[in-house]
Structure formats: structure tokens, C-alpha cells
Image (tube, helix red, strand yellow):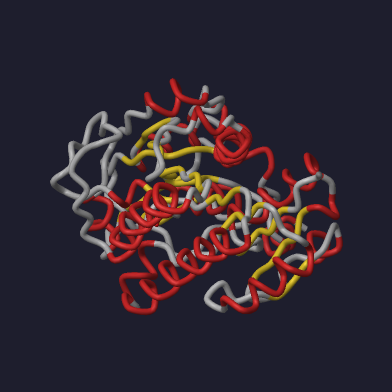
Amino acid sequence: MNDTILILGACGQIGTELTQKLRKIYGDQQVIASDIREGQKEFLNSGPFEIINAMDKDAILEVVKKYKVTQVYLMAAMLSATAEKVPLKAWDLNMQSLLHVLELAKDMHIKKVYWPSSIAVFGSTSPKINTPQQTITEPSTVYGISKVSGEHWCNYYHNKYGVDVRSLRYPGIISWKTKPGGGTTDYAVDIYFKAKEEGAYECFLGEDTNLPMMYMEDAINATIQIMQAPQENIKIRTSYNLAAMSFTPKVIAEEIQKYIPEFKITYAPDFRQEIADSWPQIIDDTPAREDWGWKHAFDLELMTKEMLRNIQPTTNELLKVL
Ligand code: AKB
């Protein structure tokens, strides 16, 4: 039987590109995109789309039944910076949606579930350099608390009910198709857009803030690779550390200046600095590489070329030129 995949939060930064890639692999009609509101037109028209609030268990159930869904990717979440402003709301969204999906997977015999965790599970008591898979996880943000708790729920549903749930601890994800919203690592996306559109960027993190990052193509490949790996290769049912590169705002700015020499960066750290300072700088993802063959393809140099090649000047910018 062909798999039918439901993506919750399909219009977000990762969801958009994940949906497109899964539709290429499994067929447009086999991948049901859903979000709390409609997204881009070409994306909506490329296959089935349903409006679903990920906190509404009945709405998810209805769609699971309607399409005979066999796999669910739960991509809806509130990210670290926004979550700090509305902690209880963030907790509700991030936890309720996960518990709904895990319960449905158990009751409706959904074959596989994907749920993203984050480097935010680590806190200031975790080792910052080569942060191991298993170490202290005492996060200081509500987002991190929801992710570390979610990881334990995934592990629990796997051990207790045999739910085949798989998860990755994403670093900051950098992409040009859909912008992220509300994350602490978002500066590393904004910087490319501002460099291309305005030639200058004011960074909300200090120049030496080193954080783990990954290009979207690698993140999507990792996600699909872990979901397609044989069950016996998935030995960690909390969530796998995942890494590609680490850099500071100063280093990314210097890389951009190789192509846009006049690009200027200034620094005005805000409340997000404290969040960034609590996170690891370099992640050790050996178990992901050993268990299911994870390998990244993009480093800072390659990613910068891709980002600057793909970001088109905005209409405003074009008007200035004309
Ligand atoms: C965020 O900054 O909140 C996210 C993450 C690292 O999970 N990008």
C-alpha cells in the first residue's frame, strides 16, 4: 500500500519545503498539506490542502480518516523567541499538538510520526563544545522545556505503545523560500535578505555568538532519511543530535562580504542574546551518522553561494534601480 502523509504546519519555513520534497517522492495526491491558514498559491494547488489547527484533535482525526493517513509530520510549533513572550500559549501549542498526534498514532495505527526537536533542549549547564547526544538537558526557555518534555513523550509512546516516532534536534535552519518566524537563529536568514536588498544589517545577536546551523536542503534530507531508515536503525527514540556547521554573525558577514564587499553589519543584541548564550556552540551528532548514515552536504561557503544566488531583489529594490 502507498503511504499517505499528513503534514501539520505545512506553510511554515520547514513545512513548505518538506511538503514539496515529499510530493516529489510520494506523489502530489499522497501528501496532504495542512496549516491553520492558507499559504502560497502554487503550493496549495500542487496537492491536497486542509485547514487544521494542530491543537484540535478532532480536526486532525477527521483528516486522518478522510485520507487514510499512514504517516504524520508535525511541523507546527512556536519557536524560542516568540515563545518567551507568551510562555503558556507556547507550552499549550507545542505540547497539545504533540500529544494529540501521539494519541492518534496509537489509536489509529498510524505507521510513522515525525516530530522536530531542537538544540534548545540544551541549557547553560550542558557542554557547549561538541555537545554529546546524551548529556545534561536543563533548558532555560519555555521552547526548550517543551522540546525536552516532548522528547520524553515520544520515547514513552514508543516504549509503551510501540508508536514509531522519530525525531531530530534541529540547529538553526537557513533557507530562502519561506522565512522563519520567531526563532533566535533567524538572524542567519535575515542577514542574507538584508545584504541583498539593503547592503546592511543590524544583528540582534553579538558578533561572537557561535551557534549550530544547517542549510534547508540538508535539514529536509535528514528528515526524510530518518523517516525512511529501517526501524532497527533508529536506536534513539527521544531525538537525535543533528549538525552541519557552526558560525558567528561576524563570520557569516565576512563570508557575505566576499560577494557583496560593501555589505555592512552592526550589532544591537536584544533579549535573544540570553537565549543564544544558553545554547550549545558545536553539536556532536555521531549517533545520527552511525545509526542511519546522516551526512551533511552544505558548509558556510556553499550555503552562502546558494542563498545569494536565490534571493531576488524585492520590488522596492528594483524600483530604486529603475
Ligand atoms: C529557534 O531559534 O528557536 C529555532 C531552533 C534552534 O529550534 N530555530
Q: Position of residue 276 (x, y in %)?
A: 28, 51
Side (left or right) of 202 relative to 124:
right
Place residue 169 in its image quadrant.
Answer: top left
Q: Residue at 53% of width from left, 53% of height from top? A: 194
Q: Nearer the viewer, residue 9 or 228?
A: 228
Image position of 266 with respect to 136: above or below: below
Place residue 109 in its image quadrant.
Answer: bottom right
Side (left or right) of 65 relative to 204:
right
Q: Residue at 31% of width from left, 75% of height from top? A: 87
Q: Position of residue 258 (x, y in %)?
A: 51, 29
Q: Which image quadrant: the C terminus?
A: bottom right
Q: Position of residue 191 (x, y in %)?
A: 48, 49
Q: Which image quadrant: the N terminus?
A: top right
Q: Position of residue 138 (x, y in %)?
A: 19, 53
Side (left or right) of 4 relative to 278:
right
Q: Residue at 42% of width from left, 59% of height from top? A: 183
Image position of 192 with respect to 304: above or below: below
Q: Residue at 27% of width from left, 50% of height from top? A: 206
